[in-house]
Amino acid sequence: MPCQLKIEPNICSCDYDGIILVSGCAPGFDEPEPFKTVLFSAAQIDSALGVIGAVLPINLPAKRLIYSPTGPLNMDYHDVRSFSEAATKGIERALKAGVRCPLLALLPDIRFENVELVTLLGALQGLYV
């Protein structure tokens, strides 16, 4: 799958058919809208959402939200690799869902240095087949 890397300032862009949200926080609380509402509703009916993620409908041009959580990051051995693993799983899940033009979204996380780079590299690893 050929891909172009670019910074996309607009989540409402029509250029994507799926948004992969990599998150290190509990679903439905710290995300900006419209992610927050979708994730909060899904978390009410799926207690595993914060661990395994899901493909959810979202009212954006991309139509699909692939939520890929890191899971809990509360142990002393957790580090930035959790974001890489979540990004890899998110990309792989998006491909299985039929996404061909993914938009990778990451919430800011000050706990780890280089979280953006590590997340991007994890996503690219998932694309390398």
Image (cartoon, rainbow, N blue to C red):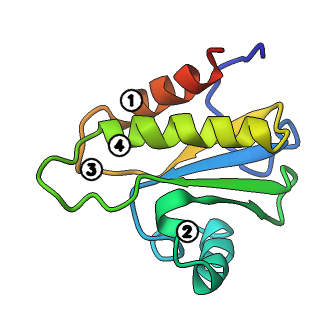
Residue with the mark numbered 1? 118
Image depth: mark 2 or mark 1 in front? 2
Which residue is found at the position 82% from the left and 38% from the top?
99
Mark 1–mark 4 distance (CA, rounded to whole Å) = 9 Å
Point out the residue furthest to the left here. 76
Residue with the mark numbered 2? 49
Q: Are marks 1 and 3 in contact (CB under 8 Å)?
A: no
Mark sitting on residue 110: 3
Say if 11 sits above or below 47 in the image. Answer: above
Name which quarter of the figure residue 103 lies in. Answer: top right
Q: Are marks 4 and 2 in contact (CB under 8 Å)?
A: no
Chain-order first, disc 2 or disc 3: 2
The kind of secondary structure element at disc 3 is loop
Hey, what amino acid is under mark 2?
A: Leu
Name which quarter of the figure residue 4 lies in. Answer: top right
For the N terminus, which image quadrant? top right
Mark 3–mark 4 distance (CA, rounded to whole Å) = 14 Å
The kind of secondary structure element at disc 1 is helix
Viewer-side residue, 91 vs 119: 91
Where is residue 63 drawn, in percent x and y?
85, 56
The kind of secondary structure element at disc 4 is helix
Which residue is found at the position 64% from the left and 84% from the top?
45
Hey, what amino acid is under mark 4?
A: Ser
The kind of secondary structure element at disc 2 is helix
Viewer-side residue, 59 vs 47: 47
Chain-order first, disc 1 or disc 3: 3
Chain-order first, disc 1 or disc 4: 4
Where is residue 126 drawn, in percent x and y?
58, 26
Chain-order first, disc 3 or disc 4: 4
Hey, what amino acid is under mark 1?
A: Val
Mark sitting on residue 82: 4
Q: Are marks 3 and 4 in contact (CB under 8 Å)?
A: no
